[in-house]
């Protein structure tokens, strides 16, 4: 029985997935019963009353109120039960608990991008800890998409100009498949993502170290990604022009003068300090407005941004 | 029909009246200018069969492409166009006009004992509109194609390249043909029943077509408006559905399904109507629960207008809306169950013959059973969230549209073929073809329920390797199905080359279309039939000494 369920529905990733499967399997057996009834009655009547002689007259059986009420009321009762069952599960699954991790998801032709509470961004890989409710907040940058996690039995359309939620509580660690389920053009069928459900330790480690590919990407590229994704670019230019903060162009090795009269030649340590504790030294001519990024950059990312700034001669 | 009370000959031109409609006038012009409902029905029949062939070729291409993941025979862009054209052709150019415009056009006036439909010229006009729509659709295919899916969801459809404007215009035009046919049939049923034929003396086929016509007239204008708004946005940048222009993309889905859910009943009710004729005839038995079947057709037609939101459970619509739509959806299941049991019980104590039309009707009972039962899965919100936009939905609607409507259409085609063309086809060949279609159909679509339940999304060009076995089973099934159709085309065409050999009433039916010659004379009946008694009076001898 369980193996039939597994064959028909694939792996389960949450307790809710099992709830859906229980209703699904109930409907399978209900359908098997009614289908068998239809087949039996059809074949039985057709064969038992097959034509043996041409031109016979047959009895005039035009209706039978009791029978007709029976086969109207029984189906009605059954389907009303199914309605409540399905709707109850649905409501329960779509109310996110208060302690859910909120992750923003953006769909665009043809990739999924994720943004975590700490500002971390990833593309194509979504990491969540096991046994903690997750609330995805989704939107689209172009046409309709649909974020579908079969193992969680959950999906939602992703709509440009709107934010929608999707809630699930993964209980099974490992990789889960994500599909785009709303047709979106040429590479619709390749618009997939991986959902990694990590043990709490692995998740913590991932939050600190980031994706394994961070380790293998050239540092300058990692730095460029950090510059764009973490929002450095909103205050620091890379072409030398003055913005809310000093430009990164030619910064490495430059001598910076501070409001307290001191000065320094920009090196690795100065950059790290400026990121983690920006108010420590304020370059003359600028306001002390930069927020701290303490804990938001992982070691490879920090290494990357330094390499990136070094590159911008 | 028992007890036909003859009225005296009304016309003196006996010679002219004795010519059958196929030989009353020769040459293309006599067909293109005809206002005879039978000839118009036949012209519709060849048109929709051609479209069915075209849609079928696209279907075989889809299945062949899915034999392997990634590219098998075509690119992703081509695949997207092919499945769009398959769906759009099958829905708008084949299924919607199939039973009403082709078969009912031919047989309904005969069943009612009428000389023609209420507005014969309008009838011809709607065929021309249909042809215009078909040509525009073909133009859209050859000038860039369309890759939106038959649902034309915004904002994809307002931003993609290709001939979307032309294709939506084609659907817009075809809608008018559908509306005019509906108006014509409603008027015909109200006004042209033979003397003595009350509403409940009509064959159930006419009730089914009546309910269908109601939906055609009431729902199709909504599609027309929707497509017009889409055209305005696409061509003139007026923001209605695209959020970039200040519109609402979900609004389009509401509009679209407000038409298209009722439209699925435009597709199934005529199929049910055919089955309601075939089963009593081949069981030689009174239909069980005449009124229940008649009223449930009308009930389905009305309820179908308030369930459209069950296509949108994942669209971000409110939970309350989902609850209401799910609740009402289940009420559609009940009349469907009632009808199914009525048809089955009609055979009880009957005299059942297994000619090809009856084999199709029996196949219908089983396949509609599966289609309806899987609809219940989709009506349950929590299960639908998982199954929506997967192959499960694809399988569900093929069981109801192909497994039920098309199978019933084929049953009707075989049933009325001798009446329409005056020839019998090869019965053994027809049984073989029916068996192949039944087996091939199930082999194609049963695996898709499992594919969808396991998470395979629809409209996918490429797929994960774990889905390949089931996809291949489905593709092999489509070859069996295709073979069945080839055989069918073979013996049907072969029958047309024979001498006319069909008796007036080969199946010993009691309804009126069988009480005139095969093929019928131009004016249908020598004398206007007057009716006393019901259409399924198989319990008493045929009145008037007619052959039963
Ligand atoms: C017992 C009766 C039925 C029920 C309860 C039912 C229920 C449903 C539901 C809830 C959906 C939406 C599934 C989704 O998109 O997630 C659906 C889809 C569909 N149904 Fe049915 N249905 C029934 C019978 C029929 C019939 C008789 C037809 C047509 C002849 C039909 C044609 C379709 C089509 C064409 C779609 C999907 C269209 C698309 O998305 O492209 N259904 N059905
Ligand atoms: Cu529907």
Image: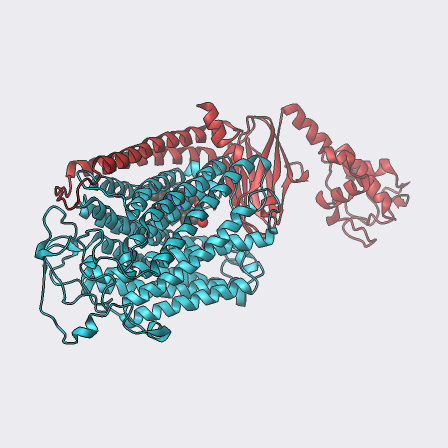
Give the chain letter for cyan. Answer: B
Residue furthest front as drawn: B499
In the rendering, at what x and y percent does residue A268 appear? 86, 37
Does the image show residue B339? Answer: yes
In the rendering, at what x and y percent does residue B508 appear? 19, 51
Q: So how many labels did they put on this image? A: 0
Left or right of B232 in this view: A40: left
The residue sitting at 21% across, 67% down in the picture is B115
The residue sitting at 59% across, 54% down in the picture is B77
The residue sitting at 15% across, 46% down in the picture is A55
Task: Kindly indicate the quadrant of the structure image that contains residue B465.
Answer: top right
The residue lying toward the viewer, choosing from B108 and A290, is B108
Residue A174 vertical placement versus B304 (above, below): above
The residue lying toward the viewer, choosing from A262 and B109, is B109
Q: Quadrant of the N terminus of chain B?
A: bottom left
Residue B23 vertical placement versus B313 (above, below): below
In the rendering, at what x and y percent does residue B463 appear? 58, 41
Does the image show residue B312? Answer: no
Residue B381 vertical placement versus B65 (above, below): above
For chain A, give the colour. Answer: red
Tell me, what colour scheme is on the image? by chain
In the rendering, at what x and y percent does residue A152 appear? 52, 33
The residue sitting at 84% across, 49% down in the picture is A249
Task: Kindly indicate the quadrant of the structure image that contains residue B339.
Answer: top left
């Amino acid at each position: 029985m369980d193996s039939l369920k597994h064959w028909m529905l694939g792996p389960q990733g949450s307790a809710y997935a099992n709830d859906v499967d229980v209703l699904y399997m109930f409907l399978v057996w209900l359908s098997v019963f009614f289908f068998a009834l239809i087949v039996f009655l059809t074949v039985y009547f057709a064969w038992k009353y097959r034509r043996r002689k041409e031109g016979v007259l047959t009895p005039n059986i035009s209706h039978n109120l009791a029978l007709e009420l029976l086969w109207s009321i029984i189906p009605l009762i059954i389907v009303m039960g199914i309605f409540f069952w399905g709707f109850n599960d649905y409501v329960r699954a779509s109310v996110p608990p208060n302690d859910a991790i909120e992750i923003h998801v953006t769909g665009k032709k043809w990739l999924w991008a994720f943004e975590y509470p700490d500002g971390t961004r990833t593309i194509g890989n979504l990491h969540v800890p096991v046994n903690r409710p997750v609330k995805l907040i989704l939107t689209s940058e172009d046409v309709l998409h649909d974020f579908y996690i079969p193992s969680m039995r959950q999906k939602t359309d992703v709509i440009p100009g709107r934010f929608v939620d999707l809630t699930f509580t993964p209980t099974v660690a490992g990789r889960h498949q994500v599909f785009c389920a709303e047709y979106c053009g040429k590479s619709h069928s390749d618009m997939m993502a991986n959902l990694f459900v990590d043990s709490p330790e692995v998740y913590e480690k991932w939050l600190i170290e980031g994706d394994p590919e961070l380790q293998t990407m050239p540092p300058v590229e990692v730095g460029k990604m950090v510059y764009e994704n973490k929002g450095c670019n909103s205050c620091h230019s890379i072409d030398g022009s003055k913005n809310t903060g000093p430009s990164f162009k030619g910064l490495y090795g430059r001598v910076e003068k501070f409001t307290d009269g001191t000065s320094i030649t920009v090196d690795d340590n100065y950059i790290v300090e400026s990121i983690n504790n920006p108010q420590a030294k304020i370059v003359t001519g600028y306001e002390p407005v930069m927020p701290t990024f303490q804990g938001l950059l992982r070691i490879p990312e920090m290494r990357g941004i330094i390499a990136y700034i070094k590159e911008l001669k | 029909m028992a007890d036909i009370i003859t009225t005296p000959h009304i016309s003196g031109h006996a010679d002219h009246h004795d010519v059958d409609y196929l030989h009353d006038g020769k040459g293309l012009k006599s067909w293109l200018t005809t206002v005879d409902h039978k000839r118009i029905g036949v012209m519709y029949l060849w048109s929709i069969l051609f479209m069915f062939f075209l849609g079928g070729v696209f279907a075989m291409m889809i299945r062949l492409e899915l034999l392997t993941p990634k590219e098998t025979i075509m690119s992703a862009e081509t695949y997207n166009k092919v499945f769009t054209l398959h769906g759009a052709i099958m829905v708008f150019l084949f299924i919607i006009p199939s039973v009403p415009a082709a078969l009912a056009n031919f047989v309904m006036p005969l069943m009612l004992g009428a000389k023609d439909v209420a507005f014969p010229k309008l009838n011809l006009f709607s065929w021309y509109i249909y042809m215009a729509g078909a040509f525009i659709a073909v133009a859209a295919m050859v000038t860039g194609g369309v890759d939106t899916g038959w649902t034309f969801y915004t904002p994809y459809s307002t931003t993609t390249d290709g001939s979307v404007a032309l294709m939506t215009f084609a659907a817009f035009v075809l809608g008018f043909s559908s509306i005019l046919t509906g108006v014509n049939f409603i008027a015909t049923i109200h006004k042209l029943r033979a003397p003595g034929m009350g509403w409940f003396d009509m064959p159930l086929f006419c009730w089914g077509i009546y309910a269908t016509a109601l939906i055609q007239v009431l729902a199709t204008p909504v599609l027309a408006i929707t497509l017009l708004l889409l055209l305005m946005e696409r061509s003139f940048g007026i923001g209605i559905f695209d959020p970039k222009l200040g519109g609402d993309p979900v609004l389009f889905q509401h509009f679209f399904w407000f038409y298209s859910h009722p439209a699925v009943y435009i597709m199934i009710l005529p199929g049910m109507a055919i089955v309601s004729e075939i089963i009593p005839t081949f069981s030689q038995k009174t239909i069980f629960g005449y009124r229940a079947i008649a009223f449930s057709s009308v009930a389905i037609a009305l309820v179908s207008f308030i369930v459209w939101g069950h296509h949108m459970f994942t669209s971000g619509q409110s939970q309350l809306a989902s609850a209401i739509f799910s609740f009402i959806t289940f009420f559609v299941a009940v009349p469907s169950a009632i009808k199914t049991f009525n048809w089955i019980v009609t055979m009880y104590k009957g005299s059942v013959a297994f000619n090809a039309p009856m084999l199709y009707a029996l196949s219908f009972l089983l396949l509609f059973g599966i289609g309806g039962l899987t609809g219940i899965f989709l009506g349950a919100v929590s299960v639908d969230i998982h199954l929506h936009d997967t192959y499960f939905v694809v399988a569900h609607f093929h069981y109801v549209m192909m497994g039920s409507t098309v199978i019933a259409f084929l049953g009707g085609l075989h049933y009325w073929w001798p009446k329409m063309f005056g020839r019998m086809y090869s019965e053994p060949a027809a049984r073989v073809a029916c068996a192949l279609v039944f087996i091939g159909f199930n082999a194609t679509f049963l695996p898709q329920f499992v594919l969808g339940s396991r998470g395979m999304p629809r409209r996918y060009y490429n797929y994960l390797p774990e889905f390949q076995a089931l996809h291949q089973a489905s593709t092999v099934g489509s070859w069996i199905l295709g073979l069945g159709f080839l055989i069918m085309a073979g013996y049907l065409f072969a029958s047309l080359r024979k001498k006319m050999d069909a008796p007036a009433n080969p199946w010993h039916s009691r309804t009126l279309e069988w009480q005139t010659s095969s093929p019928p004379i131009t004016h249908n009946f020598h004398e206007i039939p007057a009716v006393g008694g019901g259409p399924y009076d198989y319990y008493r001898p045929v009145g008037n000494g007619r052959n039963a």
